[in-house]
Image (cartoon, rainbow, N blue to C red):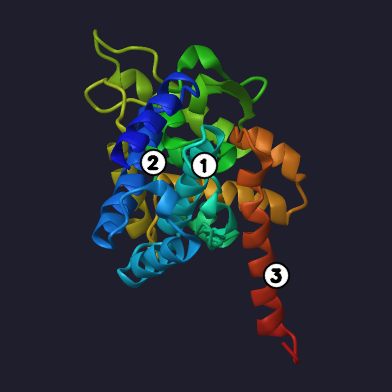
Amino acid sequence: MFEDIDRFILYLATEKGLSTAYQLSTRRSLEGFAAWAKKQGVSSWANVELPLLTRHLSERKKDGLATASIRLLVIALKIFYRHLESRGRVSKNQADALLAPKVSRYLPETLNEIEAAQLIESISLERPLGLRDRAMLEMLYASGLRVSELVNARLEHLNLDDGFIRVTGKGNKTRLVPVGGAAREAVAAYLEKERPKMVKSHTSSEVFLSIRGKSLTTVRIWQICKKRAQEAGLEISVYPHLLRHSFATHLLSNGADLRIIQELLGHADIATTQVYTHVDNQRLKSVHQKFHPRG
C-alpha cells in the first residue's frame, strides 16, 4: 500500500507539478489511512471497501480532527483512488461515494464605521510618530492594503496628486489602489513633516520608516495597531487585516459592487470576496433583530 502511495506522490510532483506542501499533506493523509487499515488486517488497496473508509473518517472525527482536515482527507482519498483505478490497481473506486463535509465559512471580524473613525482620529498628531501612525492606519483602512503591501509601499509608487498607489500583492501581482482624501492628507503631512527627520544615510524609498530610518516590519505594524487601539479605548483586538476587512465590508454596505471590491483587494477569485456579503447580511440581520418590534 505504501509503494502505491510513493508512486502517486511522484505522479503529483512530476506530472501534475503540484507544490511540495500539497504533496506532503496528501502523503500524510494517505499514509495515516494505510497504517490504520493495516491494523484492521487490510494490506491491499483492492481489499478496501467503502464501510472501512467511512469508519476511518468517523474515528478521525471522534479523535477531534477538524472538519476542514477531514474534508482534505476525503479529497486525498478520492483523487488517489481515481489514480489507482486509471492504472488498474483497483477494479472500483471505493472512495467515489464518500461525501466531503461542508466547512463553515469563516466570517471575518470588522470594526464598525464609528470604531474605525475613533481608532484613527484618536491619534494625536502632536505626539512623536503620530503623523506616521495616523497615515499608516488611514492607508490600511482607506485602501484595504495587506500589511505586507503597506510595508513594501515605496515613494516612487505613490501618486498623491492623482490619489493612487501601486502595490504588489500575492502572486507578485501589481494593482493600482485609490488613496482616499483623508488618507492623502495624512500621508502628505507625514511625508512633509515627519519622514524627513527619520531619513538616514542607509534609508531606502519605503514610504513608512522606523525611527532608525529602516523599513518597518509586519510585526511592528501589528504592535502599532494594538497600541493605538488601546489608546483609543477600543475593546476589540485590532490588527492590520481587521482594517482590510473593515474597508471591504464598509464599501459593500455603502453600495459598492462586489467585482470592484474584488479588484481593489487584489483577490484572484470572486469567491474569496463573497465572504463580505455574508458579513453584511449578518449586520443587516442584527440591525433588524435589534430595532424591529417582531425581530
Q: Earlier in the sequence, mark 1 or mark 2?
A: 2
Is residue 74 in view from this perspective?
A: yes
Q: Earlier in the sequence, mark 3 or mark 2?
A: 2
Q: Residue at x 50, y 11 (%)?
A: 156
Q: Is residue 254 above or below residue 211?
A: below
Where in the figure is residue 257, as x and y percent of width and height?
77, 44
Kind of element beneath mark 1:
helix
Kind of element beneath mark 2:
helix
Q: Residue at x 51, y 34 (%)?
A: 186
The label on residue 122 is none
Q: Is residue 107 above or below residue 137?
A: below
Q: Which residue is mark 1?
A: 79
Number of other residues with Cα within 10 Å of mark 1, as a class: few under 14, some 14 to 19, many 20 or more: some
User: 101 or 218, which lies in front?
Assistant: 101
On the picture, is 287 further left or further right than 140? Answer: right
Q: Amino acid at mark 1?
A: Ile
Where in the figure is residue 14, as x and y percent of width and height?
43, 19
Q: Is residue 12 above or below residue 94?
A: above
Q: Amino acid at mark 3?
A: Leu
Number of other residues with Cα within 10 Å of mark 2, as a class: few under 14, some 14 to 19, many 20 or more: many
